[in-house]
Image (tube, coloured by chain):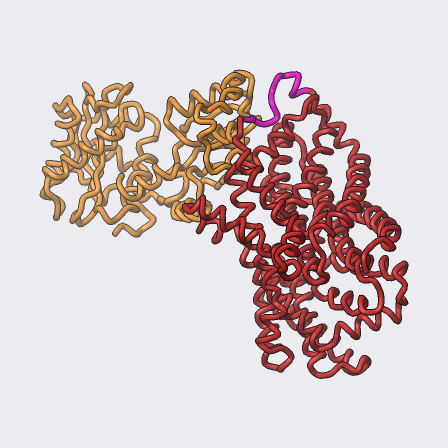
Amino acid sequence: MHGEDNGAVLSTGQLIKRMALLLMISIGIGMAGSIFGGFTDKQVVATSVFLAIILGTLFFWTFRLSIAFLGLTVLIFTHSLDIEHFVASAELPVILFLVGMMIVVGALRDLGFFTWVVQSLISIPKMTGRKFIAATSVASALLACAVDEVTSIIFIATLIFQVCNRLKLNPTPYIIICVLCTNIGSAGTMMGNPVGIFIGTKAGLTFGDFFKWAFPIMLVSLGSCVGITLVWFRKELDLFDERLRERIERKLSLVPTVVVPYKRGLAVLLFTLAFIASHHALEEALHLGKNSILLVAPLACSGIIMLFKHDRARFYVEHEVDWWTLLFFMLLFAIAGTLEHTGVTQLIADGFVSLCGDKPGILIPSIMATTAIGSAFVDNVIFVAAFSPVITALGETMPSMPLWWALLFGACFGGNITLIGSTANIVALGMLEKQAHTGIGFFQWLKIGALSAFIAMLIAWGMLTVMAPYMPD
Amino acid sequence: MMTSKEVRLADYLQEDCILCNVDAVTRDKAVEQLVGVLHGKVDGFNSAVAVQAVIERERQAPTVLAEGLALPHARLAGLSRPMLAMATSLSGIDFEAVGEEPVHVVVLILTPKDDPGAYLRLMASLSKTLAEPHMLKRLTVAGNAREAFAILTEGPEQVEVKLTASSVMNRNPVTLDEGDTLAHAIQAFCANRIMDIPIVDSDGDLRGIIAIEDLLGQSLPQHLLWMEDLSPIENFEPFAELLRKDSETKVADFMRDKYTAIPPDMPAIQLARIFLMQHVRQIQVVEGRRFLGVVNLDSFSSQIFWA
């Protein structure tokens, strides 16, 4: 996907070179579309701007928001997008859903919920290294399902660092295991990853749909990921076992544990999850539009939280909400929407069908593989935003639900392939460098990352193929 | 303002500002006599104010630097240029420094308030000159001012003084050994009321540092700090294990191996930048890996603003 400091450490000369390359490639491909694909002028502009955003995240990660702002300006100036369509495509409900969840997460931390989760993991009876890492990685995946992948990895990675610090171990292998599992877990619900809620909104999928169709696939894939990584890192886990045994024999704890009043935090989380889970039933009972309650449920919960914790309300909104990323998402959705309005995505959909046919048996792995490879290098939200209109177009002639799931699993599992494949990877890498003063090599990650992603996608493909006939049209 | 890098003691200490074998036996009396000698030679200071400033400074932090030597000083508003005066005493002067014997050589340094460099340069120059072998003994027994002045100025006429890290560092800070226990560290922190301690090995090489926050952090790790309200652990329960095992836990287990080490010849002004930019309280001065001393933010600041 990207490196956190990408672009920030460039000299002016390098910056100009990369910027020129970015413009040349994006405009060149847009023009090629005009010459060979018969693109209209608006389609050329929309394609070029979208490609500039993709390349911008690759070459200038720290400048991605400015590139998105400028891209939007170009679209408006060239009549490729008007304000009305911008507002319609910016997916404000999705953004507000994410704002609400971020505030809830801030309150959960304040209330000791994450402290309790961490302490519960440390307090596993008859602890061994393997047991600890297996439990932590599964917890990381489930936490990603309940809140989101980035929040999950921040808390879980902190635990890993603390434990490894006490045991004088290099945390790298254990961090890799947990990050891989977190990315898998993020496909389990619509809260796990921004692409989940985006796909849910675009496809009209409910929380129940995710729980029924995506969650079981995620669980089986998670099992495979845990199994593969435990075997892959068996030597490191042997060392972990040995150090842990020594420490326990010395009657020393891994980290101090205290009695944490977790019940309020747990209640907040369960209430939020229950509210989100019951959105479909409530919408039907109250005759409200599809997913309308889903999208406001986190806002309602965060509203209640801010009412009770009014002294922290401003802190939650100003510091817990990642406005930088959300603004980028908003513009990205709008720019991807322009691809749809100008008919570029219809052309891609037609091309996809002419290349892969219209049989779900071929389309599912094709979509999954394309999305996975794309997400390994480019922000998966960008890929999903660009691909979702293609799925919508494909869905006009065939059942679309299996294709949406293929898109979801490709985007989430594909994040495991490279160390820059997902935001969780980037965050964990940053923490590793800052706290353990160590890093991970690209190929060190690629070997186990690609293997675990490949197996997980095979499982998802197999299960989707079996489940597809039972899915609603 | 004193801007030259070369310091010539004779420019600041005149022969008639040296009092040999004074009859003063107390610090305050000796200071009064020295200020009295300087008064009238330099413009712009009131002797009563100067005496009070020097004595106040001594009360807060005695300036007995080496056995038998004191360098009382004050920075005075309105003083036109730096001045020195020296007194010697065969019988010794009680400088009221805890654990120190009476001093035999006292050099009073008066510098303009707005010239921190002058004080630092004179201190560095005097330290160099007075550190010569038998220098203090020879000055103590000098029969008159002319003889004492000759002894002081017998070396190179000008001493180049660069204000470097070594001019402002503490050469004898509290240190710990890698093999010391947590109990030693706790004792060192609390008894000396310090915040940072360098960890030095048996070869005198710097291995790491330990800060008071590291002790707190051992008992209150990150996952406990996520909670906004720590009142459920108001009895400091997480500290119990740490304290129970303080004789078994080695400082090497939780020292930091990342620290701010600088060479001794780094310009002193550069340290101000490091303190501000890196948000550290202590800078370690090393030559290669060999530990030479530390510069603490508080003493660095007081040398600039107050000393």
* Quadrant of image for the C terminus of chain A: bottom right
Q: Name the image quarter holding residue B28.
A: top left
Question: Which color is chain B depicted in?
Answer: orange
Task: Name the side, left or right, on which A167 lies relative to A213.
Answer: left
Foreground residue among B96 and A165: A165
Front-most of B140 and A115? A115
Residue A395: x and y in percent read 80, 66
Between residue A135 and residue A174, name the one nearer to us. Answer: A135
Residue B183, placed above or below residue B160 = above
Above or below, comparing residue B264 to residue A235 in the picture: below
In the rendered structure, the answer to whether residue A260 lies left or right of residue A243 reads left
Specify the quadrant of the image occupied by residue A349.
Answer: bottom right
**Residue B145 point in image, percent of width and height:** 17, 32
Q: Main secondary structure of the magenta part?
A: loop
Q: Give the tally of numbered discs.
A: 0
Q: Position of residue B29 (x, y in %)?
A: 12, 27
Res A430 seen here: no
Residue sitting at 52 percent across and 21 percent down?
B242
Q: Is residue A360 above or below residue B151?
A: below
Stretch of the chain drawn in magenta:
A246-258
Name the residue at 44% across, 32% down: B196
Q: Which chain does red denote in the image?
A: A
Whether the magenta-drawn stretch holds residue A255 is answered as yes
Corner quadrant of residue B10: top left
User: Where does residue A17 sit, x and y in percent of width and height?
Assistant: 65, 70
Report the front residue among A1 and A433: A1
Residue at point 87% right, 55% down? A469
Location of the N terminus of chain A by quadrant is: bottom right
